[in-house]
Image (cartoon, rainbow, N blue to C red):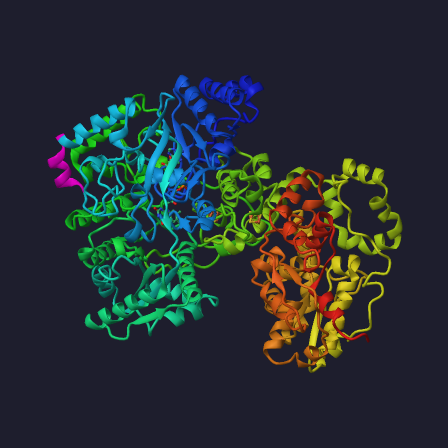
Amino acid sequence: MNAPLPLTVAREAAGAYDRVASVTNDIAGKLAQRLAKETQGEVLFSPADRGRYATDASIYQETPVGVFVPRVAEDIRLALDICRDLKVPIVPRGGGTSQCGQTVGAGLVIDCSKHVRGILEVDAANRTAVVEPGLVLDHLNAALKQHGLWYPVDVSTSAQATLGGMAGNNSCGSRSIAWGNMVHNVLGIDAWTADGQLHRFGKFDEAAGFVRGIGEQVRQMAGDLAPDIDAMWPKVLRRVAGYNLDVFRNQNPKPYTADGSVNLAHLLVGSEGTLAVTRSLKLQLAPLPRAKVLGVVNFPTFYKAMDTAQHIVRLGEGTLTAVELVDRTMIELSLQNPAFAPIVRGAVIGQPDAVLLVEFSGPEKAPLVKHLDRLVQLMGDLGLPGSVVRLEDDGAQKALWEVRKAGLNIMMSLKGDGKPVSFIEDCAVPLEHLAEYTDALTQVFRKHGSRGTWYAHASVGTLHVRPILDMRQGGAPKMRAIAEEASALVRKYRGAYSGEHGDGLCRGEWIQWQFGPRITEAFARIKDLFDPQHLLCPRRIVDAPRMDDTRLMRFPPSYKVIPLQPALDWRGWDVQNDPSTEKTTRPGTGGDPAHGYAKAVEMCNNNGHCRKFDAGTMCPSYRVTRDEKHLTRGRANTLRLALSGQLGPQGITNPEVRDAMDLCVSCKGCKRDCPTGVDMAKMKVEFLHHWHARHGWTLKDKLVARLPDYARHAARIAPLLNLRNRVPLLARLGEKMLGFSARRRLPEWRADHFFRERPATASRDQVLAAAKPVVLFVDTFNGHFESENARAALALLQAAGYTVHVATKANDDGGHLCCGRTYLATGQVDEARRKAREVVEALSPFAERGIAIVGLEPSCLLSLRDEHLSLGLGAPAQKIAAHALLLEEFLARELDAGRLDELKAKLRPVTRKILVHGHCHQKAFDAVSPVLKLLKLIPGAQPELVESSCCGMAGAFGYEAAHHDVSMAMAELSLLPAVRNAPDAIVVADGTSCRHQIRDGAGREAVHAAVLLARQLPAA
Ligand SMILES: Cc1cc2nc3c(=O)[nH]c(=O)nc-3n(C[C@H](O)[C@H](O)[C@H](O)COP(=O)(O)OP(=O)(O)OC[C@H]3O[C@@H](n4cnc5c(N)ncnc54)[C@H](O)[C@@H]3O)c2cc1C
Ligand code: SF4
Ligand code: SF4
């Protein structure tokens, strides 16, 4: 069994020193206490906190002593002083997206990304900016846009990567052929050395004191080692290993500075936190390219593509900004995706073995088009006439870049214990050898029973490739064997073994191999000059451990999962794969003691993609808290640690898991956006099931869950129950006794609800025999609380000429048909299954006949397509899922089939602006565009989609007193401001919770799309 993490909570460490010290070592307790007392930062020492910071996007895991989240930059210095006193190592961290274990370490992890992220200065005239280390690249570039500038080191993780982390790793973007790496674009760094002194690292000529002294000594070393440097140092743009000793004897094809001077900040770039802790960075900005064109070159063989890259990079006269490879596997994966297939088809000719995306950028389009002409000509000269697809339109280019990204994501979503592992994923070789190198490495993979999918930066000879290895079973020795053969190839072709993602735990031991003993010794001396006590990231770059030390791995051979009987069906994840064909075994055969749940959780590879801030849907709780704990990645890590016993014997029912799950609003943003398909909403249902099975359900949980069952009885005493919304004392009592926020109005009960005053509609037999049949599934919320929506939907369908049957239970017991959502939301899976079974019984005959089952409330209807398939209800549930549609999805489909002319002709025009807010589950199922499409049927309507993520209400979540503030904060991110900014607009929101949040937060009535459409029908 995996060893549990030893330390208990010290969050409020100031008063908790004794408690911490009694269960752990004295130093950790003192550290927690002093950090809490002497700084303003957050002190996170619980086992789960430490576990969440024990990993990054690499295969490694090492548990830190604790985690510190500085509130202001000065906190970092204070933490440095405390750590020095107590001799505790420090691991600085940004987004934690490193692929080689750079942020994994046993000391105090300092997370700069939450608070220390300001833009301190922008000098547009001189094109420079000064920023704090925790600032995310995309946020910097968003702020620079108004100046027509950007920071051009465009790493793929631009939405998560911090400038401090990028400098730490000497990161490189897709367009490095034009702009170089971080080292080429950093002008200065202010940083604390381990002794707590703040120094300015900039031009060597201008340096004084300590910095000058260091500069002198490094210059001396570079001079002494000149023959070694000349002989051993890789002469490629993409070399990021070791320290940049060559600032004094440049080996990089692109000079580090424009004027040839030496900049001592460049010693810190790529030092991976081992030399100093960055306080701020001065960056060289670039003009934002105004025009771009893209040529997609199609190759009959991968070899030919690789061989041609060296010729293509000579084109463009300085305007060539990218040559990116996409291989056949990725093309095929993209073609399997219905959204991407048309884009890919438009860019490929026949069935190419590989394509190169060749981009030219500049101030104007016309000259770039000429470069595209030359590309076409070049390909003709090289024997490939007609191989280039020209994309001059910006939208088309953007769409294709998106596909390239998504292709990689699909590759990463391989189920089973074998995963594409990064350890030789960024070797860089000179372009003239690229074809031979990739060919030889492919043979190496084959020899070891694996294969690699190739992609990325052909322009600079850095191709990403990850062979599939099972680290639990023989992965480590295979990794070493492949690494050794790959390194021999790198040496043969005089390349760089570490060409983009850094050294970390994965490539540190290869530094000596790359540079020889004398330069390696010089690196050790540089480390000693900066950090004689080895306080900063010890055993990284200098004296690094072996890459295949399984004690440092997340999934060592000893990794075990606590047996668990899940309530939902996770067998689809319980598989193994064949590393050479990527074919997976049958569901349920993967050997997971948690029957697939653990393997589903382990799909999170920590890439940090969920640390997103744009108005997409993933992950709203992180966006409002910026806490790792409230991030999809943090939750998946917490679950993984718990399921594998690393948080203690309670396994999944550990309170730390409950805390991490608490703010998950089950929006399914991750289900849609997570590259590896982590579906935390579903995982939360499973967790809640086990948690409540052990701890019981509260009265509030029961009231929420059973609402569909008691609703018809409660409706009879509607005026009495509604008093709660009118008498503040009752609301306060409700908060105290049940936990519903007194600051919220609860949905109003009504006696005249849809189910009681049900309009006459077609019977089961009539709809089964009808020419234009449809079944309307009316959920609890629209049926009981907002009956006008259900009536509007009915009117609309009838006006469009459909024979409508309102779904009822097969065995009528007086209650309405319910999807079981409220039971799922409280983890009562067995009850939910009972409800779902009723749905299956009632709707199967219609699904069998291919009749559409149409619903109004996204979270209810879409559970027929989602959660119901995990309840073990077999083929009938699948059949129903195939025919379950939201009202707008159904009508949009009918529109496309030319069957809505009747309805279209009836709709009266609208003059007001229409704002549309998509429900999270609509977004997760790509069901928002049908809403817009339908609304556009109304003459004069120009519906505008609000760029919003979760409204924050999320079922009962926002009604709970404990969640009120977080709920409102989520709504304030984008939805409520957008509504307020359009005071005259009609607001359309299909989710019942969303409508309530809009009313509570902006004081505006939002309507279901069905209501707006029905209003435009002539009065009957
Ligand atoms: C899917 C994926 C795609 C990627 N694509 C690219 C790519 O295109 N190009 C590329 O170069 N990399 C890429 N990477 C690697 C990684 O995203 C980048 O290196 C990124 O710049 C790291 O940023 P971060 O904020 O996550 O840094 P972290 O991983 O948190 O830290 C990186 C290093 O910087 C140090 N550090 C952080 N803050 C400080 C500080 N204040 N003072 C001193 N040292 C500090 C850390 O100790 C660590 O050594 C990719 C990673 C993934 C998972
Ligand atoms: S949850 Fe998904 S997006 Fe987030 S880190 Fe894990 S794999 Fe990446
Ligand atoms: S379901 Fe939503 S809130 Fe929960 S982890 Fe996923 S994105 Fe975050």
In-image side of 788 versus 991 (left or right): right
Q: Nearer the viewer, residue 960 or 711?
A: 960
Vertically, is 861 above or below 67? Answer: below
Taking the view exactly as shown, the residue that stands out farthest to the front is 125
Q: Is residue 757 magenta?
A: no
The kind of secondary structure the magenta stretch mainly shows is helix
What x and y, as percent, mark residue 804?
74, 74
- The correct choice, above or below, for 147 with respect to 987 in the image is above
Quadrant of the image containing the C terminus: bottom right
Residue 229 inside the magenta-drawn segment: yes
Which residue occupies the extreme left position in the image?
Answer: 227
Relative image position of residue 646 (x, y in whole percent):
48, 35
Residue at horizontal 58 percent and vertical 51 percent from the top: 682
Q: Residue at x 74, y 67 (%)?
A: 810
- Residue 312 coordinates in the image, percent (x, y): 24, 62
For residue 249, say whether it is visible. Answer: yes
Magenta-highlighted residues: 224-233
Position of residue 885 relative to residue 979, above or below, is: below
Residue placed at 47% from the left, 50% from the top? 146
Give the left or right position of residue 732, taking residue 484 as reference. right
Quick check: 130 left or right of 458?
A: right
Of 160 and 119, nearer the camera is: 119
Q: In this rendered view, identify the residue nearer to me: 624 or 315.
A: 315
Look at the image and tell me in which quarter the N terminus lies: top left
Question: How many numbered marks have been drawn onto this rendered protein structure?
Answer: 0
856 shown above or below 526: below
The answer to whether residue 326 of the structure is visible from this angle is no
Farthest residue to the bottom: give it.
Answer: 771
Measuring from the top left, give residue 420's x and y in whole percent: 36, 51
